[in-house]
Image (cartoon, coloured by chain):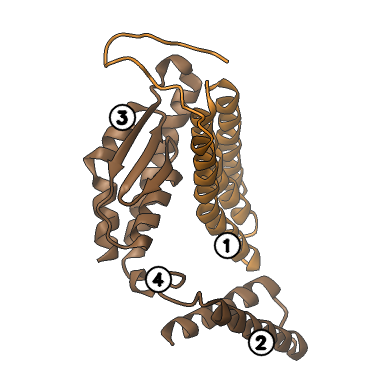
Amino acid sequence: MRHTIFLSLSLTAFWLLNSGHNTALMLSFGAISIAFVLYIAHRMDVVDHESQPLHLTLKLPGFYAWLIKEIILANFLVVKHIWLGNKTISPTMVTIKASQKTDIGKVIYANSITLTPGTVTVNLEGDQFMVHALLRESIEDLQAGEMDRRVTQLEN
Amino acid sequence: MNISSALFLLIGSFLCVSGGVGILRFPDFYTRMHAVGVTETLATAMILIGLMLQNPDGLVVLKLMIILLMTLFISPTASHALAQAAIHNDLMPELDKKEDNEKVKSSNP
């Protein structure tokens, strides 16, 4: 029930942001389409804690702030090596172990790795992530496990 | 306001160009994907922030924020799908073969 309420609220906000109209006719069209989307989502059985991760809401802002900082630093590193040329890069492919229990935790971790330039999650089996990195240092940073720890903290 | 907007747009454009140079310069598929990573994260963010500063009061800012958020959710998924398709089709990356000190390879396409 919580998830349905949250989904309808976010759909309403999204509709209002995108339309900018507030005549009665337009608002009723909006209400009809939101009700229709809610009906479809229920039939597809996708309204649950995975599509609406409400339990993460309070912890996410701190994690995002840290992730944005990491992304900016990684961007500078990759741009530096783009201009320095091929001699300075050290492409590496390793398998690392993730400590997350839930699927959503693993997805957040894998997506965070991919979102940071210089590292891409290539394959994911169980708790083994195959990661390709542009530089050996990025892999060493991942193996040190700061990101892993933060994502695990997020899911508990 | 216009100056800061221009500054953000300039940095964003520079990062986009860097990403493009990286795509041309790097030796294989996977390393090129890292170059795209620059274009799709910080460059996008900088350009969108620059555009937000062009018209800071209005619905446009919120719409641009939604675009930014969507990009940050969608692009890693797309990158991962690409990389996984490549590895499943047995495209092996050119790895750095040196064990810490000896330089073995330098290859250009």
**What subunit carries mark 3?**
A
Which element carries disc 3, helix, strand or loop?
A: helix
- Residue labelled with disc 3: A137
Q: Which mark is residue A3?
A: none
- Residue labelled with disc 1: B66
Q: Looking at numbered disc 1 in the image, what kind of residue is underneath it?
A: Ile
Q: Is residue A93 left or right of residue B1?
A: left
Which element carries disc 4, helix, strand or loop?
A: loop
Q: CA distance from mark 4 to mark 3?
A: 33 Å
Q: Which shade of the palette goes to chain B?
A: orange
* Image: B86 above or below A105: above
**What subunit carries mark 4?**
A
Look at 54% across and 13% down and name the residue there: B108
Q: Is residue B97 left or right of residue B5?
A: left
Query: Tag 1: Cα neighbours inside 10 Å, few (<14), some, or many (≥20)?
Result: some
Q: Looking at numbered disc 2 in the image, what kind of residue is underneath it?
A: Ala
Look at 58% across and 28% down and name the residue there: B23
Q: Which shade of the palette goes to chain A?
A: brown
Q: Earlier in the sequence, mark 4 or mark 3?
A: 4
Marks 3 and 1 share the same chain:
no
Query: Tag 4: Cα neighbours inside 10 Å, few (<14), some, or many (≥20)?
Result: few
